[in-house]
Image: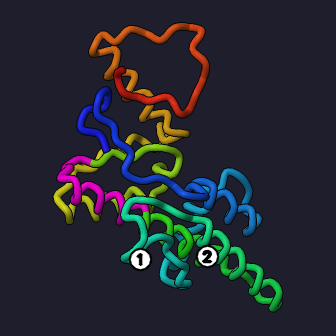
Amino acid sequence: LSTDITSDVRPMGATIDDAAGEAFDKIARVLNLGFPGGPVIDRYAKEGDPSAIAFPRGLTGPRDPAYDFSFSGLKTSVARWIEAKRAAGEEVPVRDVSASFQEAVVDVLTRKAVRACKDQGVDHLMIGGGVAANSRLRALAQERCEAAGIRLRVPRPKLCTDNGAMVAALGAEMVSRNRAASDWDLSADSSLPVTDP
């Protein structure tokens, strides 16, 4: 949650095991679709039925953390479903598996993001990172944000890589506020805070 990108950034939730992008990569691997998994699953899903297979939605129960994510159980469920089909000598419906898996991921991501905005009184949502390039995530986020009166901001798909757009937005804001550049000898550390000291 951020009310000011340079001074008020508070984590509300996190991925407790496997990130969404990792789940896309794993399922694409199990389906023999290649790497990276996100774009190829997105492509196959467009020709599949997202309601064909009822895959689980992790951490969506009433007692689960409201804003945390878990995709480990989903990955396992999809992989076992595929393995069972293959063991039975049946053809795996790749497009339906892709669409149903993708729907499970984007349903959870958008539901929790919109809930966080509503709970905190936030009227703008920005999504970024590699998974934000997913066409179904973008469409469902737009649909749910419109229904909730939230303005959605999403970078162009080519900017949705490894959170690059979010880091660039932070950098641009810091430059506009005349924040001094970091020393050249500053080590890379993914746990450094993004807010002003």
- Image point 54% across, 72% down: which residue? 99
Is residue 158 placed above or below 101 in the rendered structure?
A: above
Q: Position of residue 173 (x, y in %)?
A: 31, 22
Q: At which x and y percent is residue 127?
A: 38, 47
Q: Main secondary structure of the magenta part?
A: helix
> Is residue 149 rendered to the left or right of residue 84?
left
SS class of the residue under badge 2?
Answer: helix
Q: Amino acid at mark 1?
A: Gly
Which mark is drawn over residue 61? 1
Q: Is residue 180 above or below residue 76?
A: above
Question: From which residue to which does the magenta span run?
Answer: 109-124
Quarter of the image where one finds residue 106: bottom left
Q: Residue at x 28, y 15 (%)?
A: 176
Q: Is residue 82 above or below residue 142?
A: below
Residue beneath label 2, please? 97
Who comes first in sequence, dot 2 or dot 1? 1
Q: Residues within 10 Å of mark 2 (few under 14, many from 20)?
A: many
**The N terminus sits in image quarter:** top left
Type of amino acid under label 2: Val
Q: Is residue 111 magenta?
A: yes
Q: Quadrant of residue 146?
A: bottom left
Rounded to the nearest whole Å, what is the CA distance between mark 2 and mark 1? 23 Å
Residue at image position (51%, 79%) is: 49
Residue 156: x %, y % from top left: 41, 41
Is residue 172 covered in magenta?
no
Q: How is the image coloured?
A: rainbow
Q: Is residue 120 visible?
A: yes
Observer-nearest residue: 28 or 26? 26
Q: Is residue 39 visible?
A: no
Q: Quadrant of residue 23?
A: bottom right
